[in-house]
Structure formats: structure tokens, C-alpha cells
Amino acid sequence: MPSRFSTGRFTSTGPRHNAYEAVNALFDNAADRLNMDPQLRSILKTPFREVTVAVPVRMDSGKIHVYAGYRVQHNGARGPWKGGIRYHPEVDLDEVRALASLMTWKTALLDVPFGGAKGGVSCDPMNMSQIELERLTRKFTARISIVLGPQRDVPAPDMGTDGKVMSWMMDEYSSRRGYAPAVVTGKPLSLGGSKGRLAATGRGVVTIADSYYSAIGESIKGKTCAVQGYGNVGSFTAKFWSERGGKVVAITDVKGGVYNKAGLDIAALEKFFAEKRTVAGFPGAEPMNNQDLFGLEVDCLIPAALGDVITSSNANNIKAKLVVEGANHPTQPDADEDLHERGIVVIPDILANAGGVTVSYFEWTQNLTSFYWDEDKVNKELEIKMRRAFLDVHELARKEKCSYRTAAFMLAIRRVAEAEEQRGN
Ligand code: NAD
């Protein structure tokens, strides 16, 4: 499987904008349609708790570097806060706030009993040794552990972190509070991880695309797609798309990309990647860059790398009829409107990439009960939850004559608002 630490330095391809403001604008748009009372609106928009910590790490050189770490707990009305930890040079408080808010709406939309949170450390994991990463993770965990816990706040992997990082977090937390596998999800199987978790987000992305095609009387079979990113989400998305009889014609990663009109041989690409740690240079394919990938004549475009990659400058070049957001917040608001006006269907991140948090919920449940499921059960339950969420969104979008994104936010906000009101103030 692709390693999450081996794909090179990340650089955003879109102009930097305030993701938190953009997510709040999506919230306001849906809250307007729900005629939401201004007081409830401000409760739901404001993060419950924001923790910023200094993370001093002794580097292999012997020098100490102080990193900035964040954990934002956005809303916990429906259950413990839940959300990934990102290690990336561009992590800042506003980005973490935006991603925490998206987690609130994602968990509500999938109807898993969690709130929304996100965390991150502004660092470059590509240029750190394993031991530096371990020291960083342990120090960060120690400093935020006061707000974590299986019934309080449960982190998971995100960009730049993986099962190994979750193992260190679990160990650090458990050494203070006693053995607590349910304090993080996305762990290796040997530490109480769930079967099916690694592939869950990509599996969910393809299940959602398939649900959309079923709803319009079509199927993935024979459909072409282009995927940006070949990390956890992108690699499994490509695999399941081709397993369902679709053709993955292009993939890019941070080091380059590949294109083959007849469809890439995904099984061979997996082997190539395992050795080279990039898709660039894969034999039997032409080179491809991000700009060209976004403009390809494909049935479906799947951004599965960075945020803010579909912008007002490249949206008008997109020719795909369907965009399925594997990444978090890949589409800037202006671009989203542009795509909507051009009749390009966008399936939003909070629905499309929710497979990961759904299986994280299964993992947490298994940890709390100490009773472990086989992979078939995990995949079946995931499929049921994803298809149900898609149909809820699809029906509301039809009824309201609005985009899938607006419908998804409306459904999610309604659920959180109800819980918030019932808990009282
Ligand atoms: P990852 O670290 O495993 O992979 C990221 C991929 O993006 C790599 O292939 C990398 O090479 C590529 N990339 C980086 N910069 C790029 C560039 N400029 N051009 C093209 N490709 C580039 O990360 P991941 O876990 O796969 O997450 C990807 C996205 O999906 C993120 O937005 C993340 O928040 C979101 N997401 C992940 C999960 C999950 O379970 N892992 C769940 C929900 C959402």
C-alpha cells in the first residue's frame, strides 16, 4: 500500500484563501434556507473549544525546533468530537477551524454519533525522520491530552499522518490514563484497528459515485475518471473505480502524473508505486500535470489530494460532468457556483469522503465493546450508511431544487441544531 510519508512536499495549486470563511458561507447559505434563528446560528457556527500548543521537538541534529499545534473542537452536541490530525507545512488555525466545522456536518450527515473536530501541526513530515515524527507526535499528544478521550475527543489520521502516528498517540495517551484504544481511530489492526479502515475513504468515494449513477439510471462500468492524488484516498479510489469496470485514465501526485486514454492498469500501477513512491514515470502512459488533469474530457473528476484546487481560474476548464470530492474542501466557493451554473454535478466532501469517519465509528464501537468484526461486515455496513446518506441528500436536493452541497449542509445542520436545542443551554 502507498506510504503516506513518501509522496514529497505538498504545495497548494490554488490561490490561498480563507477556508474557514468559505465553510461558514456554505453554512449560512444552508441556514438561510432553513430560516434558522440567529442565536442558534451563532452557536452552531462558533467552535466550542480551540487549543493551540507549542510543540518543542529535539531534532536529530540536537537542536530544538518549536512547532505550532492545534486542536479545534467545533461542535459536540451529537457525541464525542471526532476528526483527523494533519501534519503539513500549511496547517494554521483557520484551516483547522474550517476542517473541524466540516467534520461536524459530515458526522451528522452520515448519522454517526460524533461531533466535529480537527487538529494539526504545522510541520513538513516529508523532511523529518521517523524518530523526529515520533517525538513530535508524543509531545503534541501530551499537550492536548487534557481535551482528548474515548468519550471526549477521538482523533484519526489525515494528510501527512497514518496508522503509525495513531499508534504513538494511543500509546502516549494510554501511558497517562490507562489502556485506551478508543482514544484514536485509524490504528493498525494489532492495536485494535478495524478491518476495512485503510480502504474506507476510497471505498466510500466510489460507493457515492456509484449511488449517483444508479440514481440517474447509469453505472460506473465504462465510465472514465481522473484522480488528483495517489495517497490513501486517491489510491483506493482508483482501485475500486477500476474494479467496478470503470476506466481511470489519469492520476497525478505531488511529483507528476500519468495519462492513458485507454485506462491505466491500476494493479500494475500499485506495484510501480510500491517501488518508486510516485505514479510519475509509470510505463505505458503519457506524463500529465494537474492543470491538464482538471481539463480532461472524462466522465468524472475526483480531487483526492489538497484543498482549494478547483478555483475560479480553472473551473471553466473542467469538462467532466461529475466532480466527486475525495479531498476536503477542494472547491472554492466561486468555482462551485460556476460549476453549478454549467450543470456540472458536484458531490460534496462531507458526503463523498465520509467513508473514513464512518469506519472510524465502527472501529471506536469495536474498541468500546472489545468485539471485532470481519471485513465483510465492515464493508456492508459502510455501504448501507453511505447509500442511505446519498439518497437523503439526493431527495432533498430534488425537493429544494438546490445543489447536493446545499442539501447535504441543510440535512446535517438540521440534525445538529435539533441535538443542540434538545440539550438546552
Ligand atoms: P495522503 O497524505 O495519503 O495523500 C495525499 C496525496 O496528495 C499524495 O498522493 C500526494 O502526492 C498528493 N499531492 C500532494 N500535493 C499534490 C499536488 N500539488 N498535486 C497533486 N497531488 C498532490 O492524504 P489522504 O489521506 O489521501 O488525504 C487526501 C485528502 O483527502 C485530504 O484533503 C484529506 O483531508 C482528505 N480525506 C482523507 C481521509 C482519510 O481517511 N485519509 C478521509 C476524508 C478526507
Image (cartoon, helix red, strand yellow):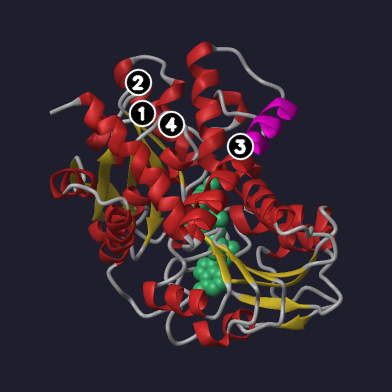
Secondary structure of the residue carrying tag 2 is helix
Label 1 belongs to which residue? 172
Q: Are marks 3 and 2 in contact (CB under 8 Å)?
A: no
**Distance from Cα at disc 1 to Cα at disc 3:** 22 Å
**Distance from Cα at disc 3 to Cα at disc 2:** 25 Å
Q: Are marks 4 and 2 in contact (CB under 8 Å)?
A: no
- Image quarter hosting the C terminus: top left
User: Which residue is rendered at x = 64% and y = 82% of the image?
Assistant: 319
User: Which residue is rendered at x = 68% and y = 82% of the image?
Assistant: 296
Quick one: label 3, few (<14), some, or many (20+) residues within 10 Å?
many
Label 2 belongs to which residue? 175
Q: Position of residue 363 (x, y in %)?
A: 54, 27
**Distance from Cα at disc 4 to Cα at disc 2:** 14 Å
Q: Is residue 362 left or right of residue 409?
A: right
Q: Position of residue 419 (x, y in %)?
A: 30, 30
Which residues lie in the magenta part?
375-385
